[in-house]
Amino acid sequence: MPDTLYFEDFPLGEVVEYGGVDVSAADIIAFACEFDPQPFHTDEEAARAAMGGLVVFISILGGIAAFGLLGVVLGPIIVASAASLLELYAPTAPVGNRASRAGGK
């Protein structure tokens, strides 16, 4: 197999298994500590507390941009509704499971 592969070197529909890795909560925090040691990445409670104000601020700005002055109220309502739906239907994190990736279809 050549060292350099190009797009046309891969046959259509080919599926390649790249293996997997076991991921734990400690692994995720260790990765965050090494590559982006912000408190909201390394401490779960700090993450919950830090993002609330930022989300409200951005939702107010987005609401004002979309709906004018009424967006001060509508923006946070829309974002809170969307966040609730996302949380309800969000997949669970691969903590304690085997995460793997297969290329192809």
Image (cartoon, helix red, strand yellow):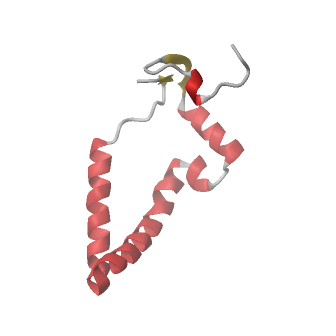
What quarter of the picture does the N terminus occupy?
top right
Label total for image: 0
- Among all residues in the image, which is located at the extreme front? 8
Who's the residue at 73% across and 21% down the image?
A: 3
Residue 2 at x, y = what percent? 71, 17
Q: Residue at x 59, y 33 (%)?
A: 26
- Rendered image quadrant of residue 4: top right
Q: Is residue 89 left or right of residue 101?
A: left
For the C terminus, give its image quadrant.
top left
Which residue is rendered at x = 64% and y = 54% of the image?
Answer: 38
Residue 29, given in percent of the width and then of the height, sits at 60, 40
Residue 22, horizontal then vertical, whole percent: 55, 22
> Hey, which residue is sitting farthest right in the picture?
3
Which residue is nearer to you in this view: 15 or 2? 2
Where on the picture, by quarter, is residue 68? bottom left
Is 79 left, or right, of 99 in this rendering? left
Residue nearest the observer in this picture, 59 or 52: 59
Residue sitting at 26 percent across and 51 percent down? 85
Placement of 100 over or under 41, stated as above or below: above
Please state if 22 lies on the left or on the right of 5 as rendered: left
Residue 49 or residue 104, whichever sits in front: 104
Q: Is residue 97 left or right of residue 36?
A: left
Expressed as whole percent of the image width and height from the top left, the position of residue 82 reads 29, 57
For the view shown, which residue lies furthest in the bottom direction? 69
